[in-house]
Amino acid sequence: MKYVLLYLLMFFSTELLADDMRPASVNINLVNDTDFDLVWKIPIRNGVRETLTVVFPEDTKLLAPKRTHIINNAYIEYTSFQRKSGVVGLKLRIDGIERSSGDVLLRVSDTQQQTITTVLNIEQPSFIVNSLVATTAFNTALTYIELGIEHILIGLDHLLFVACLVYISGTGKKLLLTITGFTIAHSITLFLSATGVFVIPIQPVEAVIALSIIFLAWEIAKNRKHSLSLRYPVLVSSSFGLLHGFGFAAVLSEIGLPAAEKTLALLSFNIGVEVGQLMFVFALFIVFKFIAIMYKSLSLEKLRIPVSYACGSIATIWMIERLAVF
């Protein structure tokens, strides 16, 4: 595919640091009609905790001092509070979310396991609990599809890998097979890891994900028509797709899965990832076509070296940062 470099430069010019797409989360569990336990988790991104705060209405009061821990590169706060009028009408607001790079997943559950799950973000920084009902399958699916789409569209390393796959595929048919191989492979490891069948540490996985981009950038630079990557891109995409699946699973483990509908939530998250991936590929084609019209003198060969160096340099920064945490 032509003209990838210009798109990459626009897309990554302000995002040279390794991405961390774990969402923050608020879990509220009703102990009885008036008392609540709260677990507030904020990811620590590149050594810095975002300044997010859960704000409750004035008619609530703390029952116990806050307890805080830092576990798995996340700040976790535990506390209990009381609201005499109960859960109905409870309004929560997330201060600082307008400066956040991710979403906040809110889950409220009562003693009967009736639950409300929603996503708070810049567009919706607050939420009022009208009532708790048994979560429908449709609502669960919709929530996790949305999370999957958002994750892939702001997951810079996964998008850069897909962009490289588009470049080395060459033809539409090869691209379809290559993306399909990547999809099947990361779906397998996502399911295995998220269900606890096969789990590996995420830090080395993230480093190897960056290395996979460096490998593709090197293949683009060499441009050897008989190399393994250019002859069989589906083999390369499938192999590295297994690693990317573990990366997706790490994010999903931070979000959590509803106890009663784990399979549905997992499938929906994966569907969301695929939808987001297709949206990205479609956006690339639009950008390619536009640039092809505006700059007819540009060609695939002219962009090959700049594209490979741009992709390889960004991925190298990510790999160094991720190795530094070992």
Image (tube, grey):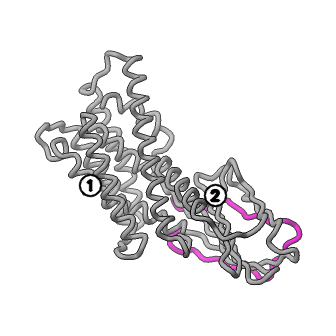
Q: Tell me where residue 282 appears, x and y as whole percent.
A: 42, 36
Mark 2 or mark 1, earlier in chain: 2
Query: In the picture, which quadrant includes the N terminus?
Result: top left
Q: CA gap, disc 2 to disc 1?
A: 32 Å
- Image height of 51 relative to 80, above or below: above
> Does the magenta segment cover residue 64?
yes
Mark 2 and mark 1 residues within 8 Å of each other at the beta carbon: no
Labelled disc at residue 147: none
- Residue at (48, 63) in percent of width and height: 251
Identify the residue position indicated by label 2 in the image.
Answer: 119
Is residue 238 found left or right of 86 in the rendered image?
A: left
Query: Residue 129's quadrant in the figure?
Result: bottom right
Identify the residue position indicated by label 1 in the image.
Answer: 238
- Residue at (58, 54) in percent of width and height: 102
Q: Tell me where residue 212 appears, x and y as whole percent.
A: 29, 53
Magenta stretch: give its range. 46-73
Question: Along the line of sight, which residue is nearer the eye, 289 or 132?
Answer: 132
